[in-house]
Image (cartoon, helix red, strand yellow):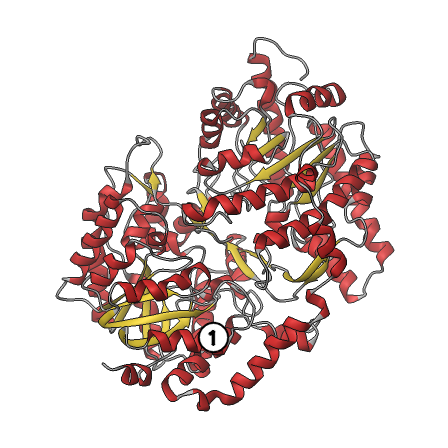
């Protein structure tokens, strides 16, 4: 096909779409089902209605081929586990008794059975359920969900493309099942898994699928020759199947590197590649391998992870260059639109001119359609759209919102010494122990306590004017009193105020910093039914006035025990926001760090002796390619130290991280120079404690003993066993006892029981130590 004919054939498509609905109908239906208020049939009806709404919106916008199979009650990787029959042994009985309840048991656990481990989906804030595999795993095909959803879309008269997690990525994301030797490599199961995929592909072909998309984002990471050989073998075998649909292999989030020639030569029918950010390197790499003659190329030129309007002229230039490198060039977002909110039209409080800078899922869909039209019919066909787009880009570039000379001057004046504590850790820890006088194995929580319906109602009433500020603040004071009282009675050593005033750990601060925009309906799925509204970092950042001092000081007035000040760190403020794309991330991080530094210093001045600066996103934001990591970690760790380095030696700085793989950033954790770090460890069986020990981590650490993402209450003995495991890696004088993460999503009854058991476990293990006392 010539470049001209490839352009004429250009069509618009997407890889996936937000699942929740305009009013988070899916969240409400699923949680209603868990509570027994919604029947299984009603839940399925809600889900089907949402799928149809999504497909119709896409089709009406001009998308030529809609995705199916991307919709999920909880997580698409868990859906893949069900599809290939890799149900963990401990969950098989529940799945056999009731498939839907068993599915949610794998995701959330039950009182008697632990859930699957959960971790971050590459470098996003989406969490997936980690497959558990072993040498005895038997795969069996279950294509019912994928076939049913394909038939739903076809019945609407739509062209539909099922989207599945590819077999290589599925195995690379998996971990050895509990009890399986840690050296077991799930990728050795590839030959056992491929026939199952072959059966599923045949089922989809029989159901009417012309194309099936197999997502292989794991191939954008650094891969060994053996892993690349596995990818080559997988697509050689799948491509050779006689009874199959056309195969589109998709990658996203970064450049493929050595995997590109492997996939380009594979006997598949098309590739979907990311051409945004670092993945723009695909343009030259594709030419270097001779292009994709005879194949379809789906070009992801619209950023599927951020919310700024696309530079249409720049994207058209990229698309024009790609013509001639493939038999057919189609247009898409860089990845699933799952990672952005649904629709800017729902926003009422953002200035209309600024709103024109933003593109959520529906607006990105229109951008994709516009680009496909321009590629197929020429720029004259979209002249109006190009003119409006140029005006929007220029408006943002010249806006005073995006540039504050005072903020930029302060950031430019930072020196290396500004990001270093005045004394080394060994001297600081002696001062802190003398000041705080905590017992061995001190107990604490991560920060938040249950956000009850009453608290959410109070915030809604304040926004709606049904109560005044005084009435709202009285409710917050009462909640803090209850949280402090409970912690004292339970016997926790370092307390928190519970954060009842905070809607979200990032949004709360963003709303008080200059340069940020908040949305009303910009919900994005984080995991399961947990949705967040990432704020939009639009301009230069400063802190006009203290943000947390008032409530922290009030909580401290209620108790003699230390109360932690609680802040969200600069890297997490970036990672869990939609960040500006018009300056380096390191520059933005430094601005945020300086604003937070002011808050840390004010907390200390108000008498706060323990200050926690959470950085759960430090690992999440780690570049997928090793070559890109040193530069990132340099500015990320500097930003944390810049936030915390201005305090006295006897002020104890904590940090917290959760639900990520920590082994490859242990050195960076050390470079943060925090006095204490708390980390997720319950689902991963204290793996992080062993990783810290292997690195020789010299500071205090609290690997979690209570999995807060499950409603189950761990027994005191279970928590004690985890503590004993932790003590084999971390000495008692440096080991803390805490949950995995904040308690915001939990209910009060399970929170009370779990924390009482946590404190009991700490006391039990203290009594087992050779000596007890203070540290």
Secondary structure state at the residue bearing disc 1:
helix
Where is residue 358 shown, x and y percent of the image? 59, 71
Q: Residues within 10 Å of mark 1 (few under 14, many from 20)?
A: few
Where is residue 551 shown, x and y percent of the image? 80, 44
Where is residue 305 shown, x and y percent of the image? 50, 62
Q: Is residue 29 visible?
A: yes
Q: Depth check: 618 or 421 in front? A: 421
Q: Depth check: 414 or 18 in front? A: 414
Where is residue 557 shown, x and y percent of the image? 84, 34
In this rendering, is residue 421 above or below 415? above
Q: Depth check: 77 or 367 in front? A: 367
- Left or right, 363 with respect to 516, comes to left
Q: Quadrant of the N terminus?
A: bottom left
- Left or right, 666 with respect to 152, comes to right
Q: Quadrant of residue 639?
A: top right
Q: Depth check: 311 or 532 in front? A: 311
Q: Which residue is mark 1?
A: 314
């Amino acid at each position: 096909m010539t470049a001209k004919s490839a352009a004429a054939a250009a069509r618009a498509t997407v890889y996936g779409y937000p699942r929740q609905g305009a009013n988070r109908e899916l969240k409400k239906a699923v949680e209603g089902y868990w509570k027994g208020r919604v029947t299984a049939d009603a839940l399925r009806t809600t889900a089907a209605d949402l799928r149809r709404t999504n497909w119709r919106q896409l089709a009406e916008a001009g998308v030529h081929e809609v995705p199916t199979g991307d919709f999920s009650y909880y997580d698409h990787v868990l859906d893949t586990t069900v599809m290939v029959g890799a149900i963990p042994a401990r969950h098989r009985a529940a799945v056999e008794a009731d498939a839907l309840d068993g599915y949610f048991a794998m995701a959330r656990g039950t009182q008697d059975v632990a859930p699957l481990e959960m971790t971050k989906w590459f470098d996003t804030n989406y969490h997936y359920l980690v497959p558990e595999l072993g040498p005895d795993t038997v795969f069996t095909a279950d294509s019912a969900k994928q076939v049913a959803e394909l038939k739903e879309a076809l019945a609407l008269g739509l062209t539909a493309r099922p989207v599945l997690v590819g077999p290589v990525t599925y195995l690379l994301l998996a971990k050895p099942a509990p009890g399986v030797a840690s050296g077991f490599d799930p990728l050795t199961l590839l030959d056992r898994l491929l026939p199952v995929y072959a059966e599923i592909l045949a089922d989809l072909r029989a159901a009417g699928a012309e194309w099936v998309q197999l997502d292989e984002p794991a191939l954008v990471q650094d891969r060994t020759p053996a892993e690349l050989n596995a990818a080559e073998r997988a697509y050689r075998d799948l491509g050779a199947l006689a009874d199959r649909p056309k195969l589109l292999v998709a990658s996203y989030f970064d450049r493929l590197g050595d995997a590109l020639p492997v996939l380009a030569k594979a006997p598949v029918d098309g590739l979907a590649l990311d051409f945004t950010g670092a993945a723009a390197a695909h343009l030259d790499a594709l030419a270097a391998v001779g292009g994709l003659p005879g194949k379809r190329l789906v070009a992801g030129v619209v950023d599927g992870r951020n919310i700024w309007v696309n530079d249409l002229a720049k994207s058209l230039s990229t698309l024009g260059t790609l013509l001639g490198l493939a038999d057919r060039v189609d247009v898409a977002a860089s990845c699933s639109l799952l990672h952005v909110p649904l629709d800017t039209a729902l926003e009422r409080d953002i200035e209309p001119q600024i709103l024109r800078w933003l593109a959520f899922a529906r607006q990105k869909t229109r951008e994709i359609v516009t680009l496909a039209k321009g590629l197929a019919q020429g720029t004259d066909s979209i002249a109006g759209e190009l003119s409006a787009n140029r005006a929007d880009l220029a408006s943002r570039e010249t806006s005073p919102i995006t540039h504050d000379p005072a903020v930029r001057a302060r950031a430019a004046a930072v020196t290396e010494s500004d990001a270093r504590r005045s004394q080394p850790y060994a001297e600081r820890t002696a001062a802190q122990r003398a000041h705080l006088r905590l017992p061995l194995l001190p107990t604490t929580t991560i920060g938040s306590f249950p956000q009850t319906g009453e608290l959410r109602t109070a915030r809604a009433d304040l926004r709606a004017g049904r109560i005044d500020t005084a009435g709202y603040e009285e409710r917050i004071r009462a909640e803090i009193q209850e949280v402090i009282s409970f912690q004292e009675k339970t016997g926790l050593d370092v307390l928190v105020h519970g954060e009842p005033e905070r809607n979200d750990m990032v949004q709360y601060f963003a709303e008080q910093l200059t340069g940020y925009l908040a949305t009303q309906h910009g919900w994005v799925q984080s995991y399961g039914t947990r949705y967040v509204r990432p704020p939009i970092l639009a301009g230069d950042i400063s802190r006009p006035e203290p943000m947390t001092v008032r409530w922290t000081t009030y909580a401290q007035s209620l108790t003699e025990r230390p109360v932690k000040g609680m802040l969200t760190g600069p890297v997490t403020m970036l990672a869990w926001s939609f960040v500006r794309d018009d300056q380096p991330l390191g520059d933005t991080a430094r601005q945020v760090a300086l604003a937070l530094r002011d808050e840390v210093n004010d907390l200390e001045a108000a008498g706060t002796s323990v200050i926690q600066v959470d950085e759960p996103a430090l690992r999440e934001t780690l570049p997928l390619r090793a070559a890109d990591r040193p530069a990132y970690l340099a500015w990320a760790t500097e930003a944390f130290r810049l936030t915390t380095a201005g305090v006295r030696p006897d002020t104890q700085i904590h940090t917290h991280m959760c639900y990520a793989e920590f082994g490859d950033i242990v050195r960076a954790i050390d470079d943060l120079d925090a006095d204490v770090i708390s980390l997720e460890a319950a689902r991963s069986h204290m793996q992080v404690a062993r990783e810290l020990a292997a690195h020789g981590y010299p500071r205090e650490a609290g690997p979690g003993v209570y999995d807060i993402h499950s409603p189950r209450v761990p027994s005191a003995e279970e928590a004690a066993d985890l503590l004993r495991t932790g003590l084999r890696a971390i000495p008692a004088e440096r080991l803390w006892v805490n949950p995995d993460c904040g308690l915001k999503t939990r209910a009060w009854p399970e929170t009370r029981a779990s924390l009482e058991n946590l404190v009991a476990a700490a006391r039990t293990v203290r009594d087992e130590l050779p000596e007890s006392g203070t540290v």
